[in-house]
Image (spheres, rainbow, N blue to C red):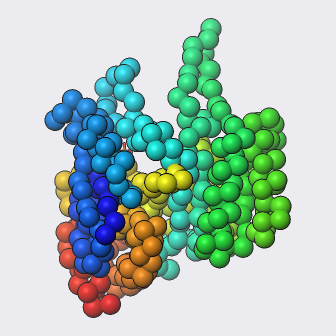
Amino acid sequence: MRKVTVIPGDGIGPEVIGSALEVLRAVDAPLEVHRADMGLACYQRTGSYLPQETLDLLEESDAALFGAITSPTTYDPDYRSPLLRLRKAFDLYANVRPVRRPHPTVGLVALDVVIVRENTEGMYTGVERDVPGGVITERLVTRKACERIVDRALSICREEGRKSVTCVHKSNVLRRSDGLFREVFWERVRGSGIEGRELLVDAAAAALVQRPESLECLVTLNLYGDILSDEAAALAGGLGFAPSVNLGESFALFEPTHGSAPDIAGKDRANPVAAILSAAMMLRYLEMDEKAVRIERTVTEAIGRGIRTADAGGRMGTAEFTKRFLELLSSA
Ligand code: ATP
């Protein structure tokens, strides 16, 4: 039995995580599931965005499944994103987003790429300061962070049988910081048995559209990874199909790439597939590969049979989609 903490969060988080939990139950995953609170609704209820009990539960868990949280709309100088705090607390340095078109009839491009994004530094240091006439943002790139993100990308390539890895950077402009990333990439790739390639970030954005088959794994810095993975998700069918994981050395937090989508929250309109696929990724991480494969195959089959929510051109709401998905899963 593996211990898992589930954090539904805000907006559509509880709806899509509810579906994912039903799917986990349906495949009889041997999990001890604990629910925990985090986010805006939690703050309104308890006065804390990230209560200590949640941190304690996570500490004792093998992995976590998280929905989404809504950021406060009014400016609060003391607000620190609970997700960023979790990334720091558990040193979740790699954001891994596999982007695969789940069926040839959705999306625009036949993508099958995994994007490995550095998650702790780059443009997301959050350090900004005023100077006369403007603002300076600090952007941090360390050798250690570059080494471990490249190493992680290489191990993902080995595990998944991906033969090449592409380093995405902008070292023609950011010569020292991105230059360091590029230098470390070539040091680590040499002799790894995986073919190394590189692209400037603007060229990578175009390659995702124009020659997706040439991209197997992208390894990149924080901001580039954020933007490219949303682009890739849109090309492969939309945010409703995009799972992800925040990985550290000894802990992993799985979450759909999409946010809390307050515009459709509580309206039975959310596509739960990204959450379901995130749950499948979690099963694979917990070495329950067969169950993960069964879920992933059912996603492709469901879409092929027209079992779809509105964002994917269907007519079903979240509840009906989940019911039909579970029927298909039980017959698989
Ligand atoms: P947040 O501020 O929490 O990031 P957001 O609405 O700005 O929320 P997303 O939640 O990523 O950003 O969503 C962008 C839009 O995509 C939403 O307005 C919603 O209409 C659509 N969307 C996102 N996720 C889904 C989903 N699972 N199913 C259907 N539509 C979705």
Q: Nearer the viewer, residue 57 or 258?
A: 57
Residue 322 in percent (x, y) is at 24, 73
Residue 70 relative to residue 204: left or right: left
Q: Which of the 4 image quadrants contains residue 154?
A: bottom right
Asked if residue 261 can be seen in this view, the reply is: no
Q: Is residue 61 above or below residue 51?
A: below
Residue 62 in percent (x, y) is at 39, 59
Residue 84 relative to residue 94: left or right: left
Residue at 55% in and 47% down? 93
Q: Nearer the viewer, residue 55 or 78?
A: 55
Q: Which corner quadrant holds the N terminus?
A: bottom left
Q: Nearer the viewer, residue 278 or 235?
A: 278
Residue furthest to the left in view is 45
Residue 246 in percent (x, y) is at 48, 53
Residue at 29% in and 79% down? 27
Residue furthest to the bottom in view is 331
Residue at 62% in and 37% down? 122
Q: Is residue 305 above or below residue 46?
A: below
Residue 173 relative to residue 235: left or right: right
Q: Nearer the viewer, residue 53 or 231?
A: 53
Q: Which of the 4 image quadrants contains residue 40?
A: top left
Residue at 19% in and 56% down? 267
Asked if residue 118 can be seen in this view, the reply is: yes
Residue furthest to the top in view is 132
Q: Which corner quadrant holds the C terminus?
A: bottom left
Residue 107 relative to residue 204: left or right: left
Residue 50 in percent (x, y) is at 30, 37
Total numbered circles:
0
